[in-house]
Image: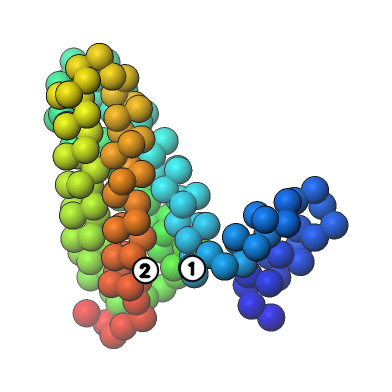
């Protein structure tokens, strides 16, 4: 029995809409967990961003720092709960994760900077969420097929 069909059976008989069951069953491997980890990472990102801005750091530098903290948190969570062991040493896997994350977070940060430049009064947390949404598709694909692809010990 596949993981998805087991999950669907666990929710049958409960008030869980059929459409959501079908979407879950058809979701690419690990996507639901990846999105859940992403929400956790975004929460870390927003909290660190807010704390650093409150401490007087500029919003662009604060966002770069908050992205760094969130990236480390999501690597650990994705390794544990989403994709599992890739067969690589942890430092090699982290290097791959950081490479994909740097590209995705560059897109994320560019969207954030563009939004806050175009709308200076925009709440920074909203700009951060929009940037994260834009970068998510690339990030999932890169992490699934590059970082956590089963491989040798790099």
In-image side of 18 versus 67 (left or right): right
Q: Does residue 7 appear in this view?
A: yes
Q: Is mark 1 on a helix, strand or loop?
A: loop
What residue do we see at 48% from left, 68% from top? Answer: 28
- Give the camera-side residue of 140 and 47: 140
Nearer the observer: mark 2 or 1; the answer is 1
- Residue 92 placement (x, y as % from top left): 23, 70
Q: Which residue is drawn at 31% across and 83% down?
A: 151
Q: Residue furthest bottom?
A: 152
State left or right for residue 60 relative to residue 25: left
Observer-nearest of 79 and 142: 142
Horizontal and vertical percent for residue 114?
17, 32
The answer to whether residue 90 is visible is no
- 113 shown above or below 103: above
Asked if disc 2 and disc 1 are in contact, CB closer than 8 Å, the reply is: yes
Question: In the rendered image, which quarter contains the N terminus?
Answer: bottom right
Q: What element carries label 2?
A: helix
> Relative to residue 49, is residue 22 drawn left or right?
right
3D distance between C-alphas at marks 2 and 1? 10 Å
Is residue 107 depicted above or below 51 in this figure? Answer: below
- Where is residue 50 shown, x and y percent of the image? 31, 23
What residue appears at the point 68 percent right and 65 percent down from the top-left corner?
7
- The numbered dot on residue 28 is 1
Residue beneath label 2, please? 144
**Mark 1 Cα shell of 10 Å, populated few (<14), some (14-19), many (≥20):** few
Residue lying farthest to the right in this orientation: 13
Between disc 2 and disc 1, whose residue precedes? 1
Position of residue 22 relative to residue 65, above or below, is below
């Amino acid at each position: 029995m596949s993981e998805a069909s087991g999950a669907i059976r666990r929710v049958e008989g409960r008030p869980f809409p059929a459409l959501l069951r079908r979407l879950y069953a058809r979701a690419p491997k690990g996507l639901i967990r990846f999105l859940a980890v992403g929400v956790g990472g975004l929460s870390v990102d927003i909290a660190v961003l807010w704390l650093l801005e409150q401490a007087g750091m500029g919003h662009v530098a604060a966002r770069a720092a908050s992205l760094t903290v969130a990236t480390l948190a999501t690597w650990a969570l994705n390794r544990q709960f989403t994709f599992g062991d890739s067969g690589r040493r942890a430092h090699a896997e982290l290097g791959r994760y950081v490479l994909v994350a740097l590209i995705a977070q560059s897109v994320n940060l560019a969207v954030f900077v563009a939004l806050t430049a175009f709308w200076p009064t925009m709440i920074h947390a909203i700009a951060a969420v929009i940037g994260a949404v834009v970068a998510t598709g690339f990030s999932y694909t890169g992490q699934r097929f590059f970082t956590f692809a089963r491989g040798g010990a790099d």
